[in-house]
Image (tube, helix red, strand yellow):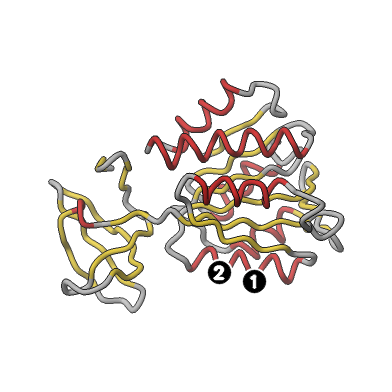
């Protein structure tokens, strides 16, 4: 990995990179050496350039499903997190879903985007995500998610921090990391710890693991938060 301007660049990161000196386009880092980054654009073209020219994405995909649709009079964890991310310069992409079909659609969008971060906000069990209208077991979640290589996934879903979900998710999707509570957690507590995590990650430019350790230290009662890699 290579550190620049408070942000670490890794092989596999999705970034924005200039194409022939013009505007920025989404790309993926394939190799790093001596301050030079080798990248591949979405159309398959390749290039190399100083790593300092790359701009890591500050987009965060927020996918939420709760018992009723959030409105102005009914705040939810992901809507509150979206406002916080805007305040610190992040680019939240919020989606409310009800079914596994919708979950697959937005996971595919997140997978194909330059964003490195996916946030899941919904009810959970040891081997399931519980959406507004359907339950999705871990095998289906893995199938819907596809290859998440280079992605950091933060789940505020209760109980998905058990090995049966967390380890299976990382193994099945290739995600760089999966962060989730092992115990049940109230949504207000989940909102606080997720803001701590993203503040440390995006504002201070630390690694996801350091951000996780910070959030756990600052808010130790958050459902036994765990980090899978």
Q: In the rendered view, would you say 115 is above or below 44? A: above
Q: In percent of the image, x 51 and y 43: which residue is there?
A: 177
> Callout 2: helix, strand or loop?
helix
Residue 27 is labelled as none
Which quadrant holds residue 226? top right
Residue 145, image quadrant: bottom right
Other-residue count near label 2 (Cα within 10 Å), few / some / many at <14 / 14–19 / ≥20 = some
Name the residue beneath numbered marker 1. Answer: 105
Q: Residues within 10 Å of mark 1 (few under 14, many from 20)?
A: some
For image coordinates 71% across by 41% down, the residue present is 160
Q: Residue 42 location, x and y as percent?
A: 36, 74
78 over 163 or under it: above or below: below
Q: Position of residue 196 (x, y in %)?
A: 56, 33
Image coordinates for residue 221, horizontal then vertical, percent: 70, 22
Tag 2 near tag 1, CB within 8 Å: yes
Residue sitting at x 56%, y 20%: 217
Q: CA distance from mark 2 to mark 1?
A: 6 Å
User: Horizontally, is 213 left or right of 40 in the view?
Assistant: right
Q: Which label sits on residue 109?
A: 2
Residue 1 is left or right of residue 13, and the answer is: left
């Amino acid at each position: 990995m290579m550190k620049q301007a408070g942000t670490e660049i890794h092989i596999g990161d999705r970034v924005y990179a200039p194409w022939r000196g013009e505007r920025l386009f989404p790309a993926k880092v394939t190799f790093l050496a001596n301050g030079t980054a080798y990248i591949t654009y979405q159309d398959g073209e390749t290039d190399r350039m100083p790593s300092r020219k790359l701009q890591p994405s500050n987009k965060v995909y927020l996918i939420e499903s709760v018992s009723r649709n959030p409105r102005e009079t009914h705040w939810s964890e992901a809507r509150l997190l979206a406002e916080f991310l805007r305040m610190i310069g992040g680019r939240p992409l919020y989606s409310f879903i009800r079914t596994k079909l919708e979950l697959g659609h937005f996971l595919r969008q997140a997978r194909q985007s330059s964003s490195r971060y996916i946030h899941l906000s919904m009810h959970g069990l040891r081997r399931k995500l519980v959406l507004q209208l359907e339950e999705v077991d871990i095998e289906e979640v893995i199938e819907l998610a596809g290859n998440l290589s280079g992605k950091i996934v933060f789940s505020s879903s209760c109980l998905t921090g058990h090995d049966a979900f967390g380890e299976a998710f990382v193994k099945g999707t290739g995600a760089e990391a999966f962060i989730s509570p092992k115990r049940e957690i109230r949504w207000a507590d989940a909102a606080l710890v997720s803001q701590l995590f993203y503040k440390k990650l995006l504002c201070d430019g630390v690694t996801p693991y350091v951000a996780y350790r910070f959030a756990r230290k600052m808010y130790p009662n958050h459902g036994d938060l765990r980090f899978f890699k």
